[in-house]
Amino acid sequence: MLRYLRVLLAVVVSGLLAAPVALAADGGGPVVLTVTGNIAKPNRGPVDAFEDAVFAHLEVKFDKAFTFTLAELQSLPQRSVTVRYEGWPREVTATGPEIGDVLKAAGAEGAKILVQAFDGYAPEFTGDDIARGKLILALAADGKPLSFGGRGPLWLLGPPDSFAGQEGEDSLAFAVIRIDVQ
Ligand SMILES: Nc1nc2c(c(=O)[nH]1)N[C@H]1C(S)=C(S)[C@@H](COP(=O)(O)O)O[C@H]1N2
Ligand SMILES: [Mo]
């Protein structure tokens, strides 16, 4: 009987401990970025019409992808961009991983890089644009994490010469949810 109780106690305790450990192992939070297209090491399967409601709404289709949580993006080398585009009330210093480093971590390679936002806005870049190494996926600005409903949680940002033919802040998408590489 005592032995039975001890086993029962062990099962209950391990059950209590299991949940937080699992959360830490996946990066500690929800997925904030999905990289699709030509990726070498996918960590998830095809778009699911029910679970992936926003992708389904935007008519996004993929059969494999590589996902990042915010913590995983924070664990990549962080870069800063200080910029003030026309019409902004002040200069902004934003930090986050360089987009090339994000693609490298996802094992993504290609000449056509589409950065898609929550509202469907989806500017396209070339491999040469990315190779300039000037575009970051900002996670924070002026020391504060970017919010959903604000410019976050991920904001594509760079100085005025970040990519070929750049005109001001055109193509600098806020609320980025997906990068597709072809
Ligand atoms: N998600 C998203 N990001 C976007 C856009 C958009 O429509 N959706 N418009 C772009 C364009 S064309 C410009 S000029 C700037 C406008 O940003 P502002 O609010 O700082 O003027 O955001 C860019 N990022
Ligand atoms: Mo614009």
Image (cartoon, grey):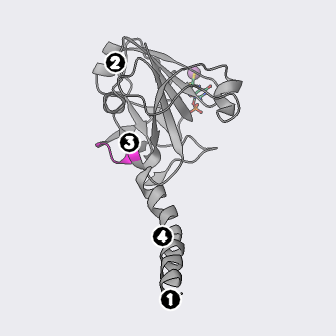
Q: Which residue is mark 2?
A: 109
Quadrant of the rendered image holding ligand 2: top right
The crowding category of the residue bearing disc 4, from other C-alpha atoms within 10 Å (few below 14, some 14 to 19, many at least 20), is few
Q: Which residue is mark 3?
A: 96
Report the quarter where the N terminus lies. bottom right
Q: Which residue is mark 1?
A: 2
Q: Residue furthest front?
A: 1
Residue 174 appearing in the image? no
Q: Are marks 3 and 1 in contact (CB under 8 Å)?
A: no
Coordinates of residue 124 in the picture (x, y in percent): 48, 15
Which quadrant of the structure image shows residue 157?
Answer: top left
Distance from the alpha carbon under mark 2 to that under mark 1 = 59 Å
Q: Is residue 63 visible?
A: yes
Question: What amino acid does circle 4 point to?
Answer: Ser
Q: Label 2, label 3: how many angstroms apart (C-alpha)? A: 20 Å
- Neighbor class of circle 1 (other Cα within 10 Å; few <14, some 14-19, many 20+) is few
Apparent side of residue 76 relative to residue 174 in the rendered image (left or right): left
Read off the residue under disc 4: 14
Q: Position of residue 61 (x, y in %)?
A: 59, 19
Badge 4 vs badge 3, beta-carbon distance below 8 Å? no
Estimate the spatial distance between the alpha carbons at disc 4 and disc 1, rounded to whole Å.
18 Å
Sequence-first disc among 2 and 4: 4
Residue 23 at x, y percent in the picture: 48, 56
| Mark 2 or mark 1, earlier in chain | 1
Query: Residues in magenta?
Result: 72-77
Residue at (52, 47) in percent of width and height: 146
Q: Nearer the viewer, mark 3 or mark 1?
A: 1
Q: Is residue 17 left or right of residue 121?
A: left
Nearer the camera: disc 2 or disc 1? 1
In the rendered image, the quadrant that contains the C terminus is top left
Q: Secondary structure at mark 1?
A: helix
